């Protein structure tokens, strides 16, 4: 199981009972998240989530925050084309379960920084992803939490993006 030193991103359910921790920035790590009960980070459990390369950032859809919805994982990659992207998974709080759905990689030579949900309702509609090649990736998701890369927008004022947030009205 990944160690607490490898945690690089967190998401917490709305009732503050479960934390989902992304683990990243270690060599040759497949996509995995760790869940734990709050308070105290007890009942830790690792969940392997497909072929993604690292899992530095995590985001819960609004429905998942309520206990049943989508968990999105930003796969850091290693800087080579086809290694960074987003993994979609289903998440249920009671009983606790995380199930891999799919993984989509960018063809750009990039890393993925943090991710943010596109919508603050339902299953989240997908995520925006900060991509270090100066792009913002738009990964849409369907009701089953399956993600699809829709487009990557280059920011003309940046050659390196590591962090972003979304404000949804």
Image: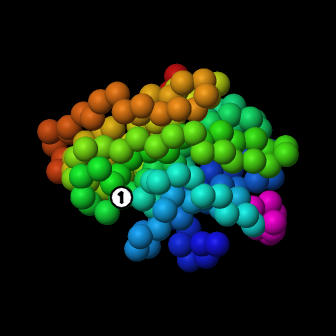
Q: Nearer the viewer, residue 63 or 102?
A: 102
Give percent across and percent down for residue 23. Answer: 53, 64
* Magenta span contains residue 40: yes
Question: Residue 35 is drawn in which quadrant?
Answer: bottom right
Q: From where the camera sits, is residue 2 visible?
A: yes
Q: Element under label 1?
A: loop
Give percent across and percent down for residue 147. Answer: 48, 33
* Magenta span contains residue 68: no
Image point 17% across, 51% down: which residue?
159
Image point 35% across, 58% down: which residue?
77
Give percent across and percent down for residue 76. Answer: 39, 57
Q: Residue furthest front?
A: 51
In the displayed structure, does residue 49 sit left or right of residue 134?
Answer: right
Q: Is residue 124 above or below residue 91?
A: above
Q: Quarter of the image containing the N terminus?
A: bottom right
Q: Residue furthest left?
A: 156
Give percent across and percent down for residue 6. Answer: 53, 72
In the displayed structure, does residue 133 sit left or right of residue 38?
Answer: left
Q: Is residue 26 above or below residue 161?
A: below
* Residue pointed to by mark 1: 77
Image point 41% across, 41% down: which residue?
104
Q: Residues within 10 Å of mark 1 (few under 14, many from 20)?
A: many
In the displayed structure, does residue 8 sit left or right of residue 158?
Answer: right
Q: From where the camera sits, is residue 14 visible?
A: no
Magenta residue span: 36-43
Q: Is residue 26 above or below residue 62?
A: below
Q: Nearer the viewer, residue 122 or 158?
A: 122
Image point 79% across, 44% down: which residue?
93
Question: Residue 148 is drawn in which quadrant?
Answer: top left
């Amino acid at each position: 199981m990944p160690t607490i030193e490898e945690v690089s991103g967190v998401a917490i359910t709305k009732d503050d009972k479960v934390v989902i921790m992304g683990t990243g920035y270690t060599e040759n790590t497949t996509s995995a998240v760790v869940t734990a009960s709050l308070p105290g980070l007890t009942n830790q459990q690792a969940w392997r989530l497909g072929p993604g390369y690292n899992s530095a950032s995590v985001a819960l859809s609004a429905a998942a925050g309520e206990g049943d919805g989508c968990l999105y994982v930003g796969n850091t990659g290693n800087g080579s084309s086809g290694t960074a992207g987003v993994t979609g998974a289903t998440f249920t709080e009671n009983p606790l379960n995380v199930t891999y759905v799919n993984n989509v990689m960018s063809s750009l030579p990039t890393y993925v920084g943090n991710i943010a949900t596109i919508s603050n309702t339902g299953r989240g509609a997908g995520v925006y992803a900060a991509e270090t090649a100066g792009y913002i990736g738009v990964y849409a998701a369907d009701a089953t939490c399956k993600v699809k890369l829709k487009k990557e927008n280059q920011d003309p004022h940046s050659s390196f993006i590591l962090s972003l947030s979304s404000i949804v009205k």
